[in-house]
Image (spheres, rainbow, N blue to C red):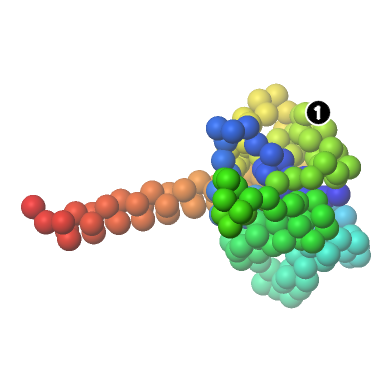
Amino acid sequence: MTTAKDLFIIAMDPAPEQTVGQGDLSLALAGAELLDLLDAGAITVDGDLVVPGGSPVPDDRLLAGAAAGITRQPPYERIEDWLWRRGRDLAATYQDALEEAGELTRKRSGLLPFGPKEVELTDTPARRRAVARRDEGDPVLASLASAVGLGSEPSDDEPRPGDETVTTVVATVHEAVMELEAVRQRRTIENTAFANVWRGP
């Protein structure tokens, strides 16, 4: 399993009062993929730039897709730019992959047989591993989860003690999610103002 898949699984299994936005989750998944590729040695981070590494890509289809999108020649891509580009609809990509693997199933919502379908996690070893990692307080997973509103930021632990690169990636994820929320709020204000103009005095 990868950090990105673990993050998706725990985001699909939140407390009832916690809902995760698809855009927020997509940005966090892109950050988790960077950390997975970093762990594998497939990339390095130079300041805020994503630089290709010398190690082969892990045997994971989604991570292979992420690695294929890495800019191979200078000027290299900034972490923030990677998050926005790779993160586009990434949550939906993970949902499709987990459904295909049988880790997500669709069920009817409501009483009508033709009602909309919702997805739910199946009880698999992957789900149990992800939940165990969350419950054990894995600092990297907890930091990424907090970016999308699941739990709180670990107070005493760094994302990975002594690893400034991981801290940089996680911090950039938090900044991108906050920027997305600011865009949402701005659009809400603009739409409200537009509606008031049409409504008139």
Q: Is residue 162 left or right of residue 154?
A: right
**Residue that badge 1 annotates:** 136
> Residue 99 lies in what quarter of the image?
bottom right
Element carrying mark 1: loop
Q: How many marks?
A: 1
Q: Residue at x 57, y 50 (%)?
A: 112
Question: Could you tell me residue 180's position as x and y percent?
Answer: 49, 52
Q: Residue at x 70, y 35 (%)?
A: 142
Residue 165 seen: no
- Above or below, 192 relative to 163: below
Residue furthest toward the front? 112
Q: Residue at x 79, y 45 (%)?
A: 122
Residue 186 seen: yes
Question: Could you tell me residue 134's position as x and y percent?
Answer: 76, 33
Q: Residue at x 65, y 64 (%)?
A: 86
Residue furthest toward the top? 156
Question: Could you tell me residue 45's position as x and y percent?
Answer: 74, 56
Q: 99 or 168: nearer the eye? A: 99
Q: Is residue 141 left or right of residue 195?
A: right
- Above or below, 33 relative to 85: above
> Residue 126 lies in what quarter of the image?
top right
The amino acid type found where label 1 is placed reads: Glu
> Residue 170 lies in what quarter of the image?
top right
Q: 123 or 134: nearer the eye? A: 123
- Above or below, 53 relative to 107: below
Q: 173 or 1: nearer the eye? A: 1
10 Å crowding of disc 1: few (<14), some (14-19), many (20+): few
